[in-house]
Amino acid sequence: MRLVTIQDKAAYDELCATGVLRCKAELAEWLSEDSFKAAYDWLVKQMKKRIGEPPNGVRYPIWAWHSLDNRTTKVDLRRSEFNNYSGEHYILTIDVPGEQVLLSDEENWHFVLNNWFLSGAKSEKDFDKAEAWFDSLPPDERQQVKEKSWEGIFDITPLENDFHRQGCFVQATFWELCREQVISERMFIGRRK
């Protein structure tokens, strides 16, 4: 499966030196925030269930793009999604076996990050109905139902209407990246705005 990942110089240098890149939790900026860590931990459970256990010593995944705005990944650094980089980074086009990758809808991923119920509603009427149902649940049931609802992020079937969009921005997670999986690389200097 062809993907694109953006890695900083330290990660790129490690990949070149050791032949493998794995997430180092202590260096992952987002994992220092409790709400993000909880979302990542949930995703890790899903990855174990859907693509298998990680290699020894691996706790969190590597992230990549499968598609951006309904197009297979070709990174345009002018897009707002890429304004948060500063310093030397590398855009790596990679080929990872499909059975080692978990794809998810990037926009719906925000429901997990924000600890919200993902109703899957395709209209405002359906959304209001689903939210009313969710709110009527006993408090001790809500978290379980909410976490089950998050599995909807793995539906990447393209859909777009006036109320809902999915499958336009598809992200990929996998346990590790091997040097031989890199097809091409391009260095850029990020200028965080």
Image (cartoon, rainbow, N blue to C red):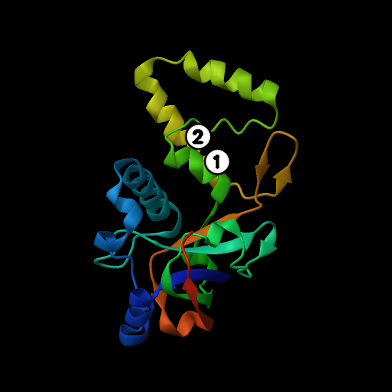
- Residue type for callout 1: Gly
Mark 1 neighbour class, 10 Å CA radius: few under 14, some 14 to 19, many 20 or more? some
The mark found on residue 149 in the picture is: 2
Q: Residue furthest right?
A: 161
Q: Quadrant of residue 86?
A: bottom left
- Image location of residue 117, percent across then percent down: 49, 30
- Residue type for callout 2: Ser
Q: Against 134, is 35 above or below?
A: below
Q: Which residue is mark 1?
A: 152
Q: CA distance from mark 2 to mark 1?
A: 6 Å
For the residue pair 176 and 111, the one nearer the viewer reads as: 111
Q: Quadrant of the N terminus?
A: bottom right
CB under 8 Å between discs 2 and 1: yes
Q: Against 151, is 137 above or below?
A: above
Residue at the image position 45 percent from the left and 16 percent from the top: 137
Mark 2 neighbour class, 10 Å CA radius: few under 14, some 14 to 19, many 20 or more? some
- Image location of residue 135, percent across then percent down: 48, 16
Q: Say what secondary structure mark 1 lies in.
A: helix
- Image location of residue 153, percent across then percent down: 54, 45
